Amino acid sequence: MEKIWKLEEIRNIYNKPLIELVFEAATVHREYHDPREVQVSTLLSIKTGGCPEDCGYCPQAARYHTDIEANDLMSLEQVKTAAKDAQESGSSRLCMGAAWRNVKDDDDFDHVLELVRAVNELGLEVCATLGMVTENQAKRLAKAGLYAYNHNLDSSEEYYKEVISTRGYQDRLDTLENARNAKLTLCSGGIIGMGENAEDRIGLLAALASIHPQPESVPINALVAVEGTPLEDQKSASIWEMVRMVATTRIVMPKTTVRLSAGRTEMSPEGQALCFMAGASSIFAGDKLLTTPNPDCKTDQDLFDTLGLIPQKAYKKGDKPSIDESYKERPENSEKTKWSRPGHTIERNEEAKNKAKEARKKDGFEPRKVSSVSSVDES
Ligand code: SF4
């Protein structure tokens, strides 16, 4: 039975002297994981940009003016090629992200199901991040061979409202529950450096740790501030904040894979080594994370060689899902789930949107095409 953490207990861990916190986290890590093994994932943006949501950190939101090039859904052949490349470079998991708000029971989703199947058949663990999903959609994904569903909580419930106004925190939790009910493993984490305080980070960890069973995978991202987004001027989180966050995550979710995600290009090799000591057990590989930069494979290989780390094999922690052909059956009456739209005003999001309108007018740009469905959670 997993421990039920009180907020106060997580706060006490988070606030420990760093050197003691890292030692404690390293001890927990050794108890539950092989400390030399690192699970390597590749994140592939299968549909980029044009998203109708207003996530303040995200260059894929159509309302902000960033230099992201929007792309339609990738073809089966493109995804298979990318998956084989990822596999050859040592990844055991491919995470496919589409900048959608939520999944709809349409041709695009049918296509994504075929992508999931194809990547599963190559022997990779398949993860998808497609925005909000209903239980039935999650079940179809599972039958097509999906192993994990990613949907990040991003921050504490309180600070989430300062970053996103177009969808609610409860929808995020409901999506995770839908994925769990479909017997998918969960990948859910957050972003630090968005202007939140320590209490928000503790709140995020409390929310994640209170999901039972706890998420199998928790990505910890450091904000990559992208020009044109509301958070463009945000100062990056320090390596010490990152280490503290990783170590606390490791202690409160001992069995979870803790993934160093966005922001690694800003971290020194020594900083990353400290994160591995503190319990990080996964990275995203490849020189791009959806739309933001990431260390290239050679740089990561050198780091692994220096530290004596080895990539984990696929399906070390769970069975490969078998394909159930009924994933092809689109429901006749698709569920009319009402995902929420809180719609409160976030000043900096409004400013960025207005700046984008001005910039487009000045440059004679057409407004970006907004897709009918949306969301990567990238996160
Ligand atoms: S829902 Fe996902 S893709 Fe859309 S703006 Fe938010 S983070 Fe970006």
Image: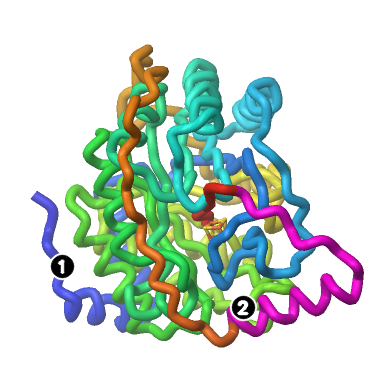
The x, y position of residue 224, in whole percent, is 63, 68
C-alpha gap between disc 1 and disc 2 = 31 Å
Q: How is the rendered protein coloured?
A: rainbow
Taking the image in four quarters, ligand 1 sits in the one at bottom right
First to last magenta residue range: 349-371
Residue at (37% x, 15% y) in the render? 323
In this rendering, the answer to whether 61 lies above or below 180 is: below
Kindly identify which numbered label has been placed on residue 5.
1
Residue at (29% x, 57% y) in the render? 173
Is residue 360 found inside the magenta-colored segment of the image? Answer: yes
Image quarter of residue 277: bottom left
Image quarter of residue 301: top right
Kind of residue indicated by mark 2:
Leu
Q: Specify whether residue 289 is in view.
A: no
Considering depth in this image, is 7 or 351 the residue closer to the camera? Answer: 351
Q: Is residue 1 left or right of residue 326?
A: left
Kindly identify which numbered label has been placed on residue 344.
none
The x, y position of residue 319, in whole percent, is 31, 24
Helix, strand or loop for disc 2? loop
